[in-house]
Image (cartoon, helix red, strand yellow):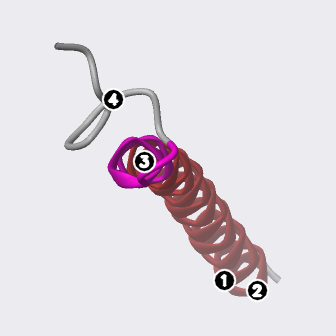
Amino acid sequence: MREEEYEVRQLEEKIAHWEREIEHCRALIRRYEQYIRNAKARLHYLLRDLHPGGKRGPGAGGG
């Protein structure tokens, strides 16, 4: 029975390790999703400024 208990403990440790790895990957995914949201917002802002009806950019008037 000792060997079986050892094997169970080893498997539990492996499971705990992989659970930590999965949580680490989830944190990375959340971080990169935030990067993507920020990049999309910046792109939207820049494209809006390039549009002829935008407040700034070429052809915005002021002169």
SS for callout 3: helix
Q: Are marks 1 and 2 in contact (CB under 8 Å)?
A: yes
- The mark found on residue 4 in the picture is 2
Q: Nearer the viewer, residue 43 or 61?
A: 61
Image location of residue 44, percent across then percent down: 50, 51
- Residue identifier under label 3: 35
Q: Residue at x 44, y 27 (%)?
A: 55
Q: Please provide percent x and percent y for residue 38.
A: 47, 42
| Label 3 – label 2 distance at C-alpha | 47 Å
Q: Which residues are magenta?
A: 44-53
- Lower sequence index among marks 1 and 4: 1
Q: Is residue 22 left or right of residue 44?
A: right
Marks 3/4: CA–CA distance = 25 Å
Residue type, mark 1 in image:
Glu
Query: Separation of disc 2 and disc 4 at Cα?
Result: 72 Å
Residue 7 badge: 1
Q: What is the secondary structure assignment of the residue under circle 1?
A: helix
Position above or below: 25 against 24: below
